[in-house]
Amino acid sequence: MEDLEAKGCVFRIEKCAFDLLSMEEDLINEDDDDIWWELIRRDLSLKSTFLYCDLNRVISSSSDELKRTLTDLANRLFHYMEELDDTIKSRSISLAQICYSDAALVLQEIMAALIPGF
């Protein structure tokens, strides 16, 4: 059962990663609409929550070596996601793009670490 649960978590992580990695064009939208910024922020928050829960489960069931790697990557990812949330609140498109790039890079590293193990 645990193996099936971990595979489901990895599948959801992949789905969230795909969704987050496809948001780049949304962040370069220079629309100053309050609703647009709020929708982007809420979408990021929702996906971050799913990632947090699923990464926590995967990390818990991983080998010690993978556990250390994933924990480090997850900490970096959520640091960048928090910075991205702050830049979206301040409506800074240029800073949001930088934070997004950092988060996307770490997210790709997480996917590369997960795929061989599952």
Image (tube, grey):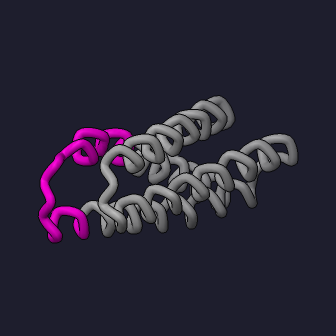
Q: Tell me if residue 78 comes above or below residue 98 in the rendering.
A: below
Residue 115 figure quarter: top right
- What quarter of the picture does the C terminus occupy? top right
Apparent side of residue 34 relative to residue 43 in the rendered image (left or right): left
**Which residue corresponds to the image point at 30% horizontal and 40% vertical from the top-left?**
24
Secondary structure that dominates the magenta span: helix
Where in the figure is residue 101, as x and y percent of width and height? 45, 38
Where in the figure is residue 27, as x and y percent of width and height? 27, 47
Q: Residue furthest right?
A: 64
Apparent side of residue 53 relative to residue 23 in the rendered image (left or right): right
Along the line of sight, which residue is nearer the eye, 39 or 49? 39
Along the line of sight, which residue is nearer the eye, 99 or 46? 99
- What quarter of the picture does the N terminus occupy? bottom right
Total number of numbered labels? 0
> Is 36 one of the magenta-colored residues?
yes
**Which residue corresponds to the image point at 54% horizontal and 48% vertical from the top-left?**
10
**Which residue corresponds to the image point at 17% horizontal and 63% vertical from the top-left?**
36
Apparent side of residue 103 relative to residue 91 in the rendered image (left or right): right
Where in the figure is residue 39, as x and y percent of width and height? 23, 66
> Is 26 one of the magenta-colored residues?
yes
Along the line of sight, which residue is nearer the eye, 42 or 114? 42
**Which residue corresponds to the image point at 15% horizontal and 70% vertical from the top-left?**
35
Magenta region, residue range: 18-39
Where in the figure is residue 94, as x and y percent of width and height? 35, 44
